Amino acid sequence: MAGTVGDLGEMALVEAITARMAGGAAVLLGPGDDAAVVSAEDGRFVATTDVLVEGRHFRRDWSSAHDIGSRAAAANMADVVAMGAVPTALLVGLAVPADREVDWVLELADGLSAEAATAGAAVAGGDVVRSDTVVVSVTALGTLQGRSPVTRSGARPGDLVAVAGRLGWAAAGLAVLSRGFRSPRTLVEAHRRPAPPYAEGPRAAALGATAMVDVSDGLVADLGHVARASGVAVSLHSDAFHVPQEFQDTARALSADPLHWLLGGGDDHALAACFPAEVDLPMAWSVVGRVEEGEGVLVDGTPWTGPTGWAAF
Amino acid sequence: MAGTVGDLGEMALVEAITARMAGGAAVLLGPGDDAAVVSAEDGRFVATTDVLVEGRHFRRDWSSAHDIGSRAAAANMADVVAMGAVPTALLVGLAVPADREVDWVLELADGLSAEAATAGAAVAGGDVVRSDTVVVSVTALGTLQGRSPVTRSGARPGDLVAVAGRLGWAAAGLAVLSRGFRSPRTLVEAHRRPAPPYAEGPRAAALGATAMVDVSDGLVADLGHVARASGVAVSLHSDAFHVPQEFQDTARALSADPLHWLLGGGDDHALAACFPAEVDLPMAWSVVGRVEEGEGVLVDGTPWTGPTGWAAF
């Protein structure tokens, strides 16, 4: 669809976006009314909001509109699965300049919708307004299917600490892009489009996970939240992490420490969880440490002094 | 709390905001984890998002931070009650420049929280990020308490059309401010802080309302959505509207047509609903017209040619 959103106008833009949105099993009433209606089978639901700002959380020269939509959806749904819930619906607030191309907005919407479908959810509603800066705010909703939510505060000394999903790939991809390179593709693509292990959150909850977070700020930073909320120490073993060859090669080429990406890099939206020691963990989970008495996050027995991830201000 | 949000940092800012937030009856798990948990007693919930942008939807020289927070909450919760639901929780995404005063952000949070409490809801979570422009995106959630949602598409010929809440006051207040005046206070305050009739949405649903909207774009524009979705015409009678003396005096002083404010002015978040003719309406509702065969919105038998409210682009 040619032209800018200013030419098209709000009503027609919303209609064009809505026409591209697929329904979802849990969305009882989708876009087009004052509010959506979503099912919450067990009488509760989880809800979380994240805001992405152009130039700060994404760059148009590094990511396509589809990638940006996909990433906004993924970042939010990772928070839902980190509670042990299954994503059901997204609401999207989009602030966009009047001179932005309609096609860019529609591709963003497609990215949101496609990523939602990957996790079994659908876009249920939203709002589009004019702004000088592009701001994408997504609310993700999910169902606990009768399970208790897995919070950050339930870790107990003796628990295993395990991770599912990629760690540091997005940070490595960002480092590659920042130096003006476009490859290795796997790392650049990991920055552009995170692939949170959606199924592993509910699975971890069903297995009895005592605490869980999604890794958005970096593993040490996010496990720091768990340690603080649970009143424990988290002790990680650096040799427990699998470091792919391409990752090591890229780190060497950029004179970077791969462990900094692994432990300090955010935006992959992996899951980190604590489990009672007797749990038989599925293959998708790698044990990387243990919960102990104390406080903070230790790496190989000492406090982590590398980068600790993202700061909003 | 002195200083800017950039000085304070994200973690401390989120902690300061969270510390001011009261819990809510439906909020089972509030801010501080990956996601909130909210109850949905009948196995469904309603959800809606609105985005407000500084300089476009509000001005700092016309509205306090408390007013802006209050208005953002009100605009969203009005969409919830327009479905016949009771608001339960808000999620707030706030994009704010690093040089904005911490106190301004805390007052905005207080406004959100206080307005939520007015409707029986609470702030359950959110996100704060840095941006050049202030963008406040609010998601409001609500419970239908076993009732069917009241959509825009159920109006039938013969239904009465009725409104609850103030109409045109916010537009009149905005006109006053735009001319550089600060009074009449009642109109200026109506712009700064809308007072949606929260209890009337669920009440209308219980009384059998066939269609309902909140008046955010202007009565004619919003009833136009009902007419289109329901495949009917809405016929309004201008002499059915109560026009307060202060409203008339202000219109005369500004050489404005009070009917333009009443029928074209948005942002009051009144409710407009259609009811079967036999319904005995409570005092809060004024009958202002009737649903007929046909299409569009008629005022005194002819298509409305006055202003039709807000356009986002």
Image (cartoon, coloured by chain):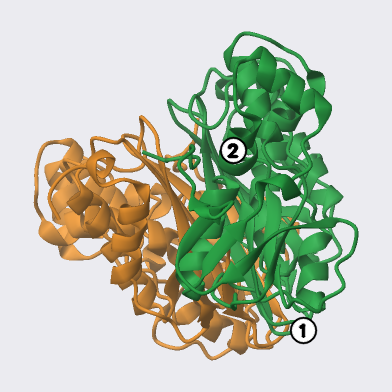
Chain colours: A green, B orange
Please indicate whether residue A163 sits to the left or right of residue A245 in the image. left
Q: Is residue B72 visible?
A: yes
Measured along the vertical axis of the image, is residue B208 above or below residue A86?
below
Task: Please give the name of the residue rendered at 43% of the width and 76% of the height, measured from the top-left corner.
Answer: B198
Residue shown at the point (66%, 27%) measured from the top left: A172
Q: Amino acid at mark 2?
A: Gly
Q: Which residue is mark 2?
A: A265
Residue found at the far front of this picture: A301
- The residue tagged 1 is A146
Instruction: Answer above or below: position of A4 versus A287.
Output: above
Residue type, numbered disc 1: Gly
A123 with respect to B180 (left or right): right
Mark 2 closeness class: few <14, some 14–19, many ≥20 residues within 10 Å: many
The extreme bottom residue here reads: B280
Chain ID, mark 2: A
- The secondary element bearing badge 1 is classed as loop
Q: Nearer the viewer, residue B81 or A192?
A: A192
Q: Taking B15 as reference, is B221 left or right? A: right
Along the line of sight, which residue is nearer the eye, B175 or A198? Answer: A198
Counting other residues with Cα less than 10 Å from the Cα at mark 1, is it few (<14), some (14-19), or many (20 or more)?
Answer: few
Please give the name of the residue rendered at 27% of the width and 39% of the height, measured from the top-left corner: B6
